[in-house]
Image (cartoon, grey):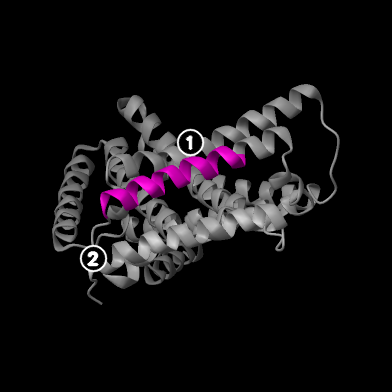
Amino acid sequence: MKLDFKKFDIFYIIGLVATTIFMIFEFIFNFINLDITFLFFYWTMKLLSGFGLILTVSNGILWILNRFTEKFSKKEIQILIMFQVIVPGIFIGYTIYSIFSNLQPSSSTVIGYWFDLIIFLYGILSLMLTLYIIPLIREEFQEAVDKGIFKRISSGAKKIGRKMKKRYFNWRGNYAKVQIQDQMTLGEILDIWRNRFAVYLLIPIAISSLVFIPITFICIIFWLKIFVIDKSEPKIYERILLLISVIWITMIACLSYSFNLVFYTSIESYFWSIQVFYLAGILISTIIFIYRFIKLKGITIKKIKDELFDNKTKKDT
């Protein structure tokens, strides 16, 4: 669908004015209770945090391999890989436990309260900075959904290059460097998916901002322009307004949680549900990780059956 930019600008201004007037009337008369919608923001952040957790594990393994490349034997590399596969299962089990434990609020020590607060605020701020604020400033936000031919070619060239390196390092017996190539690929894939989800999840962020309905309007229009209306480059004023909106909603989320403002107290009884979305983020990223890991290692059902058959044959003889 082609867009008439002059008409779009007029529509955008009218939309901002209309939603601002509605917000003012809502604050004065409070005819609709929209505070509950703020829960969507925390759900979105927790979903993306789940992705970030598995990505952090992958990057941690990559750092270890780079730091101690010459010290790892083939067996030690296999143990490290097994550890990386098991860790998401531990996170999943702990998150399920935390969902049920959070259903019954418990008192915590002063140290525990401040530790939880710092971790929570750091999670929100780091996510909003890395996935929204910095990419918007650098004009890279919409690149997460770009499927241009250049990216496909460069991605294919990188894939071929890493395959060649893996064969060379395998021939030299440098198994740590073989795994480094796989870790770099897995890290990039998880990062791409997390960045894509950040763009897709503008709609839940828009819903969470209904109490500040101009922000909802800005988020929805930005999302529609990228995916539906014209799939064109957003204008400078759209990007600036989205940046301001994201900073504002982040500030409100952090202050509400820190000082028990109405935006938090109105959803406090449902706050345990954010762990469900944390679990969803971990599960989705784990599935992507394991699927890509299996593909990188060339593991197939046929290969597994053949190996089991060979092991059985050796035992029988």
Residue at (33%, 44%) from the top-left corner? 136
Q: Is residue 250 magenta?
A: yes
Label 1, secondary structure: give it. helix
Coordinates of residue 241 in the picture (x, y in percent) = 39, 48
Residue type of the residue flagged with mark 1: Ser
Task: Please give the residue where the numbered disc 2 appears in the rendered image.
Answer: 5
**Residue 267 numbered mark, or none:** none
Q: Which mark is residue 126?
A: 1
Please name the predominant secondary structure of the magenta segment in the image. Answer: helix
Q: Position of residue 86 (x, y in %)?
A: 55, 47
Q: Which residues are magenta?
A: 235-253
Q: Give the farthest residue toward the bottom.
A: 1
Asked if residue 216 lies left or right of residue 184, the reply is right
First reached walking from the N terminus: tag 1 or tag 2: 2
Q: Is residue 196 above or below residue 113?
A: below
Q: Is residue 246 magenta?
A: yes
Q: Quadrant of residue 87?
A: top right
Q: Relative to residue 237, is residue 99 drawn left or right?
A: right
- Given contact means CB atoms under 8 Å apart, are the residues at marks 1 and 2 in contact? no
From the image, state whether disc 1 or disc 2 is nearer to you: 2
Q: Would residue 276 be visible to someone looking at this image?
A: no
> Label 1 vs label 2: CA separation?
35 Å
**Residue drawn where x is 60% and y is 53% of the image:** 24
Q: Mark 2: which secondary structure?
A: helix
Task: Tell me the quarter of the image containing the N terminus.
Answer: bottom left
Answer with left or right where residue 271 lies relative to residue 148. Answer: right
| Occupied quadrant, residue 15 | bottom left
Q: Residues within 10 Å of mark 1 (few under 14, many from 20)?
A: few
Q: Amino acid at mark 2?
A: Phe
